[in-house]
Amino acid sequence: MRNPILPLLLAAALPLGGCAFVPFAPVLADAVNSARQPRTFEGQDLAAAGAEACRARAARFGRVNITSVQPVGTDVVQVSGTIDGTRGFVCNFNRDGRITGYRGS
């Protein structure tokens, strides 16, 4: 179901020349700043996020099966798996949300 408020806000903004959005400026600025800041992961979140990120990276080559997620130090997890049941891959995922190494098909 569509939200009926958004079209009304947009329609009201045109005649007011953008003045209607002035009260929302701090909220919009916070949303933009939070989107720019890298997300950091802790504990199980790091393992789950690493598995999902590496799965997405490997999925371009076929069906992915994650076989293990192992911590490598405190800031990195190493994700291993197979693609289409035959080809293997290994992926390193950092606490700051970046894939730092990917080896495989």
Image (spheres, rainbow, N blue to C red):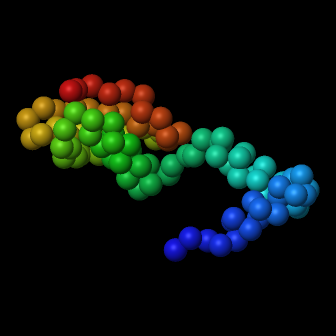
In the image, residue 92 sits, relative to residue 56, either above or below, namely above
Seen in the image, is 94 located left or right of residue 102?
right
In the image, residue 71 sits, relative to residue 15, either above or below, namely above
Q: Residue 17: horizontal and vertical position, in percent?
A: 89, 52
Residue drawn 8% across and 35% down? 86
Residue drawn 51% across and 49% down? 41
Residue drawn 42% across and 28% down? 100
Q: Which residue lies furthest to the left in this view?
A: 86
Q: Residue 55: horizontal and vertical position, in percent?
A: 30, 43
Front residue of this view, candidates 67 and 56: 56
The count of marks equals 0
The answer to which image quadrant residue 38 occupies is: top right
Q: Residue 69: horizontal and vertical position, in percent?
A: 29, 45
The answer to which image quadrant residue 50 occupies is: top left
Residue drawn 41% across and 37% down? 93
Q: Is residue 34 visible?
A: yes
Seen in the image, is 43 located left or right of residue 30?
left
The quadrant in which the C terminus is found is: top left
Q: Residue 5: horizontal and vertical position, in percent?
A: 70, 71
Q: Can residue 78 be seen in this view?
A: no
Seen in the image, is 71 located left or right of residue 17?
left
Front residue of this view, candidates 15 and 49: 15
